Amino acid sequence: MAYIGAFEDRLAIRELLEAYAEAVTRLDADAWGATWAEDGEWSLPDYPEIGTTRGREAIVAMWGEAMKAYPGIMFEAWPGSIEIDGDVAQVRCYTSEVYDRDGVTHRDRGLYEDICRKIDGRWYFASRSFRNIHRQQSPKGC
């Protein structure tokens, strides 16, 4: 577990993760898209049918379609490490998702390997690569 870099930048990156998570939970495409660099890249290697999407506009469009399959999602994210070198940061982020679909409650946990960039004084996701860690399903409400 490494936390390297100025406190203010580490806090700003934590807030970036929190803004991302809240936007997912609220299904707010504008707020979610605002966390991405214009030339960002989102990779989902566990979902080869999706693969890698490049560019904020394409990423937000893909996310908007994908989120139709996650009604009522509760999404949380927290950092495992933040290592800042100038205006670039390597971040490891863990996630927890809970949502109901077709009478089944889904509990998914995952890992993001991120590269964040500070652009004009603000941190953005330049690259996110997501992997599943654990997936659980049970009858709704259990």
Image (cartoon, rainbow, N blue to C red):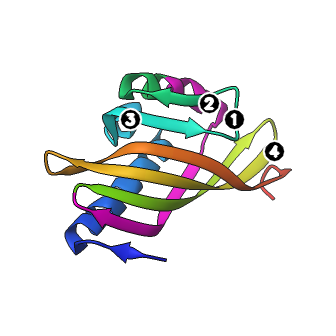
User: What SS does tag 2 mark?
Assistant: strand
- The residue tagged 4 is 104
Q: Which mark is residue 47?
A: 1
| Bounds of the magenta segment | 62-86
Check disc 4 and give the amino acid type.
Val
The reply, left or right, for residue 30 in relation to residue 131 is left
- The front one of 61 and 104 is 61
Mark 4–mark 2 CB contact (< 8 Å)? no
Mark 3–mark 2 CB contact (< 8 Å)? no
Tell me the crowding category of disc 1: few under 14, some 14 to 19, or many 20 or more residues within 10 angstroms, Cα based. few
4 or 2: tag closer to the N-terminus? 2
- The front one of 97 and 43 is 43
Check disc 2 and give the amino acid type.
Gly
Q: Which mark is residue 51?
A: 2
User: What SS does tag 1 mark?
Assistant: loop
Check disc 1 and give the amino acid type.
Tyr
- Quarter holding residue 15: bottom left
Tell me the crowding category of disc 2: few under 14, some 14 to 19, or many 20 or more residues within 10 angstroms, Cα based. few
C-alpha gap between disc 4 and disc 3: 33 Å
User: What SS does tag 4 mark?
Assistant: strand
3 or 2: tag closer to the N-terminus? 3
- Quarter holding residue 72: top right
1 or 4: tag closer to the N-terminus? 1
- The residue tagged 3 is 40
1 or 3: tag closer to the N-terminus? 3
Picture coordinates of residue 65 (x, y %)? Answer: 56, 23
- The front one of 71 and 66 is 66
| Residue under the image location 48 percent in, 45 percent down | 128
